[in-house]
Image: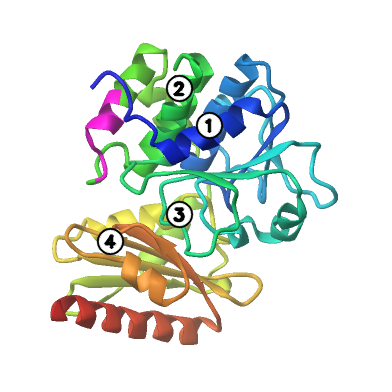
């Protein structure tokens, strides 16, 4: 496979809107991850090569480690006030406007067309005008690569780094079962364009906060095993004092999934506002998407999440009730 999959007819219509934009505003979800930031960097620099003046404003600032892929326009983040001047809003790696947090009301009020580029399932009621969506894509960065190919932008330099960052993040460095032929083909093209997986690993995984090892140990000490060891869960109260360190939840979940018997790993973190954030991961053939949907969230079959009302004990109980119902429904099929 020399090229990413072709865009469908609906996506081609969205592409025309993107091509016509002079001042596109790129937006990702809260606590932007590697797929958001890599996709934004690649698309922003690609559009700039075509003469556009893109800006990026995310709900939160990027975590440490992403400076090396920052696009020419920078990774902006919300400070309140008016949105930058724009004639199109491109939402990357999010399917719900609510995932933009405090920006949601201002974005909804924007009169500019709204374009979603994502690999999550879209809700039934459209809040967007155009969409480029493929739930079979390994990462939103894959869709960005398809778009850039159609626009005639070469996948090289910072564009290649951005796409590869998105791929590395969402495929677990090509370990997860969403690592398909297209993902590997695009990764090879990024390597030809000068991107390096070792550079990405050094930037993203070897610049941890000094508190990270102790925080990881504190989390793992709270692990509990349920369902005859098939489910592992860690709860994180605010009193633990780890403050939601970037990347901590992913590492905790990876360690839990490394246990042979574990099929589903859950992390429930108490937030400052009293609500709780569920992050769920699964090994094939287990499914955590259904669990997240039951809790008002979403995601993928192997990686999903939701926000659950607190306090923490009540949130954990609700998560486990939803998990029991999800497992029972799956067993009944």
Q: CA distance from mark 1 to mark 4?
A: 41 Å
Distance between the Cα atoms at labels 4 and 3? 12 Å
Q: Nearer the viewer, residue 67 or 158?
A: 158
Residue under numbered circle 4: 256
Label 4, residues with CA under 10 Å away: few <14, some 14-19, many ≥20 = many
Rendered view: 87 above or below 28:
above
Q: Is residue 179 magenta?
A: yes
| Residue 115 image-quadrant placement | top right
Instruction: Identify the residue position indicated by label 3 in the image.
Output: 248
Q: Is the Cβ of the residue at disc 4 closer than 8 Å to that at disc 3?
A: no
Identify residue for label 2: 150
Magenta stretch in the rendered image: 178-185
Separation of disc 3 and disc 1 at Cα? 36 Å
**Quarter of the image holding residue 19?**
top right
Q: Which residue is mark 1?
A: 15
| Residue 246 horizontal/vertical position (percent) | 52, 50
Considering only vertical position in the picture, is 308 above or below 206? Answer: below
User: Residue sitting at 68 percent across and 22 percent down?
Assistant: 52
Q: Nearer the viewer, mark 3 or mark 2?
A: 2
Query: Would residue 209 be seen by someone viewing this image from the given angle?
Result: no
Q: How many angstroms separate mark 3 from mark 2 (CA)?
A: 37 Å
* Badge 3 or badge 1: first in the primary sequence: 1
Nearest to viewer (mark 2 / mark 4): 2
**Residue 239 left/right relative to 24:** left
Question: In terms of sequence position, does the residue under pointer 3 or pointer 2 come before the other?
Answer: 2
264, 223: nearer the viewer: 264
Sequence order check: which comes first, mark 1 or mark 4? Answer: 1
In the displayed structure, 148 sits above or below 85; it is: above
Q: Residue at x 53, y 31 (%)?
A: 15
């Amino acid at each position: 496979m020399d090229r990413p999959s072709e865009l469908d007819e609906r996506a081609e219509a969205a592409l025309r809107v993107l091509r016509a934009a002079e001042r596109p505003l790129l937006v990702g979800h809260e606590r932007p991850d590697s797929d958001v930031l890599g996709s934004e960097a690649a698309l922003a620099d690609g559009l700039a090569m075509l003469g556009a003046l893109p800006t990026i404003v995310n709900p939160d600032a990027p975590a440490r480690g992403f400076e090396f892929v920052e696009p020419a326009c920078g990774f902006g983040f919300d400070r309140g006030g008016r949105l930058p001047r724009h004639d199109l809003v491109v939402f990357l790696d999010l399917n719900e406007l609510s995932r933009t947090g405090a920006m949601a009301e201002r974005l909804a009020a924007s009169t500019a067309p709204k374009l979603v580029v994502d690999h999550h399932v879209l809700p039934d009621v459209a809040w967007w005008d155009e969409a480029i969506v493929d739930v079979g894509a390994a990462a939103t960065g894959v869709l960005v690569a398809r778009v850039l190919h159609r626009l005639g932008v070469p996948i090289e330099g910072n564009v290649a780094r951005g796409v590869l960052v998105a791929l590395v993040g969402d495929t677990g460095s090509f370990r997860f079962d969403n690592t398909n032929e297209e993902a590997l083909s695009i990764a090879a093209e990024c390597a030809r364009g000068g991107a390096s997986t070792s550079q990405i690993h050094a930037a993203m995984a070897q610049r941890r906060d000094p508190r990270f090892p102790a925080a990881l140990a504190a989390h793992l000490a709270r692990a509990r095993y349920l369902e005859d060891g098939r489910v592992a869960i860690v709860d994180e109260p605010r009193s633990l004092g780890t403050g939601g360190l970037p990347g901590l939840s992913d590492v905790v979940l990876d360690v839990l999934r490394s246990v042979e018997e574990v099929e589903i790993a859950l992390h429930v973190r108490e937030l400052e506002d009293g609500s709780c954030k569920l992050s769920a991961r699964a090994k094939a053939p287990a499914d955590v998407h259904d669990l997240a949907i039951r809790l008002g969230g979403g995601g993928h079959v192997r990686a999903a999440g939701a926000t659950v009302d607190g306090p923490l004990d009540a949130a954990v109980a609700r998560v486990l009730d939803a998990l029991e119902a999800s497992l029972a429904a799956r067993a009944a099929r």
